[in-house]
Amino acid sequence: MPTEVFSVMVGGKAGEGVKKAAQVIAHLAMACGKHVFQEDDYQSLIKGGHNFSIVSIGDRPLWNSYKQHDLIISFDDRSIRTHGLELNPAGMHFCNADDCASADDSMIRLPMTSLARDSYGPNGNVSLAAVVIFSKVCGLDPDLLERTIHKEFSRDATGAITYLKKLDFVLNQLDLSPLRSWHQASEPESKLFSGNQLIALGAWAAGLDLYFSYPMTPASSILHYLALKRDSHKVYSIHAESELAAANMAIGACFAGKRCAVGSSGGGFALMQEAFSLAGMVEAPLLCFLSSRPGPATGVSTYTAQEDLFFALNQGHGEFPRIVASPDSFERAFTLAAELMDLAWEIQTPAILLTEKHLSECAANVHLDGHYLPDAPDSLNPKKEDYKRYAITESGVSPLKFPGCANSTDADVIKWNSHEHLESGVRTDAAEQIVAMKNKRKLKAQSLSLATKRYQRIASYGEGTTLVFAYGSTALELREAMKYHPFKLIVPIYLEPFPEEELEAYRGKEAIIVEHASQANFAEFLRIKLGIKAKANILRYDGRSWDSIELAKLIREAEHA
Amino acid sequence: MPTEVFSVMVGGKAGEGVKKAAQVIAHLAMACGKHVFQEDDYQSLIKGGHNFSIVSIGDRPLWNSYKQHDLIISFDDRSIRTHGLELNPAGMHFCNADDCASADDSMIRLPMTSLARDSYGPNGNVSLAAVVIFSKVCGLDPDLLERTIHKEFSRDATGAITYLKKLDFVLNQLDLSPLRSWHQASEPESKLFSGNQLIALGAWAAGLDLYFSYPMTPASSILHYLALKRDSHKVYSIHAESELAAANMAIGACFAGKRCAVGSSGGGFALMQEAFSLAGMVEAPLLCFLSSRPGPATGVSTYTAQEDLFFALNQGHGEFPRIVASPDSFERAFTLAAELMDLAWEIQTPAILLTEKHLSECAANVHLDGHYLPDAPDSLNPKKEDYKRYAITESGVSPLKFPGCANSTDADVIKWNSHEHLESGVRTDAAEQIVAMKNKRKLKAQSLSLATKRYQRIASYGEGTTLVFAYGSTALELREAMKYHPFKLIVPIYLEPFPEEELEAYRGKEAIIVEHASQANFAEFLRIKLGIKAKANILRYDGRSWDSIELAKLIREAEHA
Amino acid sequence: MRNLNTGKENTWCVGCGNFGILAAIKKSITALNEDNIPLADIVITCGIGCHGKIFDYLNLSGIYGLHGRAIATAQGIKLANPKLKVISFGGDGDSLGEGLEHTLFAAKRNIDLTLILHNNGNYGLTTGQASPLSYMGYKGLSTPMGNVETPFNPITLLIEAGATFVARGYSARIDHLSTLIQKAVQHKGFSFIEVLQPCVSYNNNYDLYNDRCSLLENTPQDDEQARHLAKATEQIYLGVFKQELKPEYCESIKLQDNPQSRTERMAQILR
Amino acid sequence: MRNLNTGKENTWCVGCGNFGILAAIKKSITALNEDNIPLADIVITCGIGCHGKIFDYLNLSGIYGLHGRAIATAQGIKLANPKLKVISFGGDGDSLGEGLEHTLFAAKRNIDLTLILHNNGNYGLTTGQASPLSYMGYKGLSTPMGNVETPFNPITLLIEAGATFVARGYSARIDHLSTLIQKAVQHKGFSFIEVLQPCVSYNNNYDLYNDRCSLLENTPQDDEQARHLAKATEQIYLGVFKQELKPEYCESIKLQDNPQSRTERMAQILR
Ligand SMILES: Cc1ncc(C[n+]2csc(CCOP(=O)(O)OP(=O)(O)O)c2C)c(N)n1
Ligand SMILES: Cc1ncc(C[n+]2csc(CCOP(=O)(O)OP(=O)(O)O)c2C)c(N)n1
Ligand code: SF4
Ligand code: SF4
Ligand SMILES: [Mg+2]
Ligand SMILES: [Mg+2]
């Protein structure tokens, strides 16, 4: 691993604050002007088991976490057993002297639990120990550490400071030489965001007022994040009785003129299909966040996968235009959520932001600057008189009015209908009317294709003779892999409507296709859409993200296959 | 129209017994050794409105109903207005003198309502009038008519006979010359069946014990038919509280060793997606009957469509093997339901029988003979000891045992799990175990492909230089169209796994593709699977079936396009 | 006031109880409008079933939703604009079968909207199958040998779930029903009206209802009495079984409009 | 008797009420087995949640189903083989939120199976969001400003829906709970046990329960009394609130095995 990246791993039991420690470490590194990438590995349990978090730190933006570390902090023996071999040659492994049966001499023992008990009382938690160790090992200013602790461990600040002092004392006695000497830089421009936070904020920037959801990993943190922002952001999170409720509520809210969204994982979306189809029929701008995990059924709740591609593309019975797009970076999570909100409202049809646990729950320092999207054209200014919800227009898009709102009058009757309908919104079974409305929706599909062209629909990264295709968060893993082996990476951001124009140059080409699925779904998709021939399929389907160095190797091998 | 076909149309209000009349007419024609095809056109209402039924009758099997008629019977004025122009040159149009403001002189007036009142009392129903008229016009033996009436109108046989007498009297006075003179033939070999009845019976023949459903047109009549057979066939229909309940119940019933099925239309399947995915994960042989109508959402409840192709192919989140096949004829509805039941159990994975309102609810005389399928190989004889539900085998298919049954012992623990699991059925999150189970399911997909080869996977009809592709009940419309213009029709019965081997000869060919959808979905499917180039897409999406003569014309035009 | 008819052909069976409900709702809307509720503020939703056809016959804004989901859709509307009066029409199969969870959660939340349940004791539109309110022994196409389940009692079920206004009307008593609807709409919180609605085609119980229906003299003093009266079968009581004020959902979550422009939102994010 | 442990690592939090439920169910199974119910005839289902993990810790056959659907799956099993004793474990989010309809319909049908509700007043597994049984004001990740909905009362709700055996136990009273489970499993018809299950991580109400729980002296004489006692809060009563015999669903629909071979079936069709 080039020395530019410094990777920290904290491992321990659920409930010991592994993730919290990683977050604070990431913040500290950012305070020193570094770039960070944080990944949390956890399972479906609340206390116990084995969790670990990685914070990879660099002087340049990092697109993935590293799987070999310069600093390992093990809160328990299981962590030592699991991660003992992941240490880089010059690295340090700190373990908890209170639970370290498997430790060897190369490891540094600290009585983390006993000191925590001495400081906080019987329920003392070791989380802070990792922060203090990191701070020492990287030569951080004690002042910065103390300020950060005050802020981040404010629930029991006194206990925390006591714990810090005790740890400090023991660490000083060890007489370690720090691996780095990092100093506080000026206030960082970027902030630490998870993918889900950026999705939530992007949608909110584009007008999100209501979020309807039922918790499901890895989408739940969108709900949690927005729920916390209720008063500051005037955004309302409704934890509905089920996904079916959430989706139907959201369509109701669209009808009444509010921008809203729903979010879940594959299982929850399986339950929203009928409502998704309803959105197609009533022409509701239903924005959906689908964050994937390995399936089928309950599958593997807390890991990553890209198995839902065709499922996402074909949701809902019947024919209607829909948008499916997948963010390939943290920044894109933000802008794409906003874009899709705009597009859904412009064309009045459902949109899916398809992502994965890897992007949803990993975090990085992200700089959201002003290069934000302009307002999208909207269709909210219908003619005054004789309003018809499904008026047939050239674009297929009909004017929108909202009941009891400034844009409508007492004379307007606004009818949305799940049956096939007349322009007025009243139901019909008549052959010609059915055809007329189906043609209208086909027109909308064309308008949608045009509208998406305003946005960046594909991304390309790197240079080289080898062509690699991927989508979603796999692009992150590949961008980091590029540092180890050069190739040209092409990423369709929009999957439906598919940006054929931008990709015409690649039609019929050979490429290596990388995805997190057990069947080469994305490869099949590229074959269908562009006639891409798979030189090799690099598949991973154990729920885990790739080590980018490993991935670079796989690509090199595939080139010679 | 060649004189070999004689077509009858009965039109009137819902509640007037239009469909009943058509059924009896079909039976009478069959008694005279004729072949019949019956189609009912109705809307979502119980009384009033406008319904009509067509019975087309021929000396050879008919594959579709005709849209121009030799005999029209209008119970009300609306029927006259709607169908007045559908009469063949030599045909007769009888109308109800009690409601015939739009009748012209060419029509024959009978006071159907008043005579019915005189016979049955105030709620007298005109249904029988159509039967009597038909019988007269086709020169049927009065005895046959009377016997049939006794049997088919047994609820008020006295009233019916009185009505018959009165109608007879008036008709005799008119001194009509019959258009045909048909005589009773020997007991017919075939019976009148709707597509849904054949699906129900096919599944039952292959062992169906429990049917779980929630009513939804056009699938409901499977439920109704099976519910009636409870005592005679020992088959149990559970009208569940929702489609979600039905599908999850069915999986439970599979676990306990019973063959079962679920059925609905697109909207109901949208609600069963999570359970469908569950079936993939737990490896439940879940048999599904999906009968399509125009969508999206509630759409058009009582008409036909093929919009759900990609939806059906991509149901359920996550990756798992599944079977999708669509019957192209009445006979196939029977055999395919049985085949899919067998395949689902052989491979332990969900199967969808995809059909449309047109096949589900049309009826024809069908001769079910002994050429029935043999027992499929089953996997129900696991080794005695150390049972593991998800034992990894060469075929990917694991042995099945059922709790509390003869094939298991008190020592067997049979665990089905919606999470990713170990061979024992206990949950796992471990990377290697996830991969092992995903690989096992991939193996099953291969075994499935092999297994389907035992069955007829494609059908081909007709001869000619023009190549036409269709699937499902569109094949019926095309087989009748062939009588008017020659072409070669190719029908994939199995859609997933796709029978590429059988279709290899057509790869890259040009063809006319006919389907009931507003987007050329099936054409896109053929392009993806076989590289078929659409010479022309013949699409119909107003919910109605084609007139085969019209369809023949469209094909001729497309040839020259 | 805008004409409340749409001109859409009415396809209910002659004699169907739904005509009475339609008449009553028109009367109620007119009265509410006279009471200064603009028509633009009245919004309807409905499920799929014979009941749902009321959507096409009423010249009001709203959503003709999915089978069973009308009450979820209604809640979304209310949350988006709490000023609106939302009236949802449900069938017994719709609101207490396919969509049972939404009905009970709307009651539990005490969200301010009105559910009018067209209780015809069967699935009318799909040709008379048994519904969650069909009596034991009811023979429909899905239960030709007779329904074996005990029907729910919608009044006591909704009281149990937390509805704060619970009433029963009869489609043949249009004036009484119309008064109930007005009270329900004016009630702050979740209001529920079970309407006894004879289905002449599959469950013609006009005689039974005409014989046995009688008006409650007063609103029962507590849930126990309400339950007792709601379950009575010798007499079938009509009227308000429960009326109570409790915190309303939209108010409890402190819903407010957010007039921030996109630029202001972006600025807040960057802050 | 077969060992009831699976050897799967237990991942409940130390002190979780689920341990008590696991202990009680093992005791019950052992007793039922001694009562001549073979283990092969006992089948379990569960939903997704902390409660669901009991599936992996119990060496019994069954289905680890979907979130909210375990009771539907259980009904399918029962219908396929009425001889089986089916026990379903549900979370409060699972059985009274996502899957509310199935729970109430199982009760309505009086189908012979047992639902054990792990009432921990939150969604444990997904990190403590409010559930349908969370108290008003409960702060979880989806309701950080406090839950504003009135919780259901599971006992009275299930009585209302038609359950014929309704009881409440407490995970810390293992012997009592085990007796309840045995009674419930032996009861012919739908049986429901609400188990008060403290969640040490998100809703630690051991103190409250230890203070207030007391045993019912007798089964209440009627539903009204049962309701009254079930809703009491000064005392939280444990025991059987209702027990009644009513026609059971599988019997009512006259379920029978069909041993006909394929050839016999075909012959019957051709007849
Ligand atoms: C998801 C779904 N399942 C089934 C249907 C078919 N369906 C339409 S209406 C209806 C039942 C109607 O019964 P009810 O709600 O009581 O209304 P009623 O017709 O009696 O007024 C059903 C099953 C549907 N439209 N959607
Ligand atoms: C369809 C679906 N939606 C959401 C989830 C995520 N999920 C798993 S368990 C759970 C809630 C658990 O709460 P509860 O049923 O009370 O069980 P507990 O963990 O408290 O025992 C949720 C929302 C899921 N697995 N499936
Ligand atoms: S079927 Fe029943 S509910 Fe439906 S319109 Fe006719 S009478 Fe009314
Ligand atoms: S989160 Fe609560 S319910 Fe779940 S295991 Fe921990 S204590 Fe038990
Ligand atoms: Mg009804
Ligand atoms: Mg819970």
Image (spheres, coloured by chain):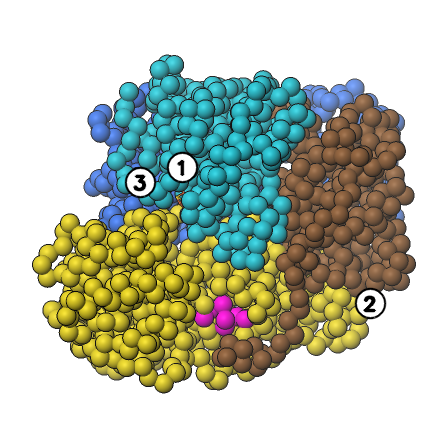
Chain colours: A blue, B yellow, C cyan, D brown
Q: Is residue C20 left or right of residue A422?
A: right
The residue under label 1 is C18
Residue D92 appearing in the image: no
The amino acid on which the numbered mark 3 sits, given as a three-letter code, is Asn
Image quarter where the N terminus of chain C lies is: top left
Instruction: Look at the picture and state if C36 lies above or below C149.
Output: above
- Mark 3 and mark 1, same subunit? yes
Which residues make up the magenta segment? B198-204
Labels 3 & 1 near each other (Cβ < 8 A): no
Quadrant in the picture for residue B477: bottom left
Instruction: Look at the picture and state if B391 lies above or below A244.
Output: below
User: What's the residue at 19%, 69% (across, down)?
Assistant: B172
- Mark 1 and mark 2, same subunit? no
Parent chain of label 3: C
User: What's the residue at 72%, 58% (across, down)?
Assistant: D62
Quadrant in the picture for residue A455: top left
Q: Which mark is residue D245?
A: none
Q: Secondary structure at mark 3?
A: loop
Q: Quadrant of ligand 3?
A: top left
The amino acid on which the numbered mark 2 sits, given as a three-letter code, is Ala
The amino acid on which the numbered mark 1 sits, given as a three-letter code, is Asn
The residue under label 2 is B411
Q: Secondary structure at mark 2?
A: loop
User: What's the residue at 73%, 31% (across, down)?
Assistant: D224
Disc 1 C-beta below 8 A from ligand 3: yes
Q: Secondary structure at mark 1?
A: helix
The residue under label 3 is C10
The x, y position of residue D140, in whole percent, is: 66, 30
Instruction: Look at the picture and state if A194 lies above or below B223.
Output: above
Q: Residues within 10 Å of mark 1 (few under 14, many from 20)?
A: many
Parent chain of label 1: C
Question: How far apart are labels 2 and 3 at the CA level?
Answer: 64 Å
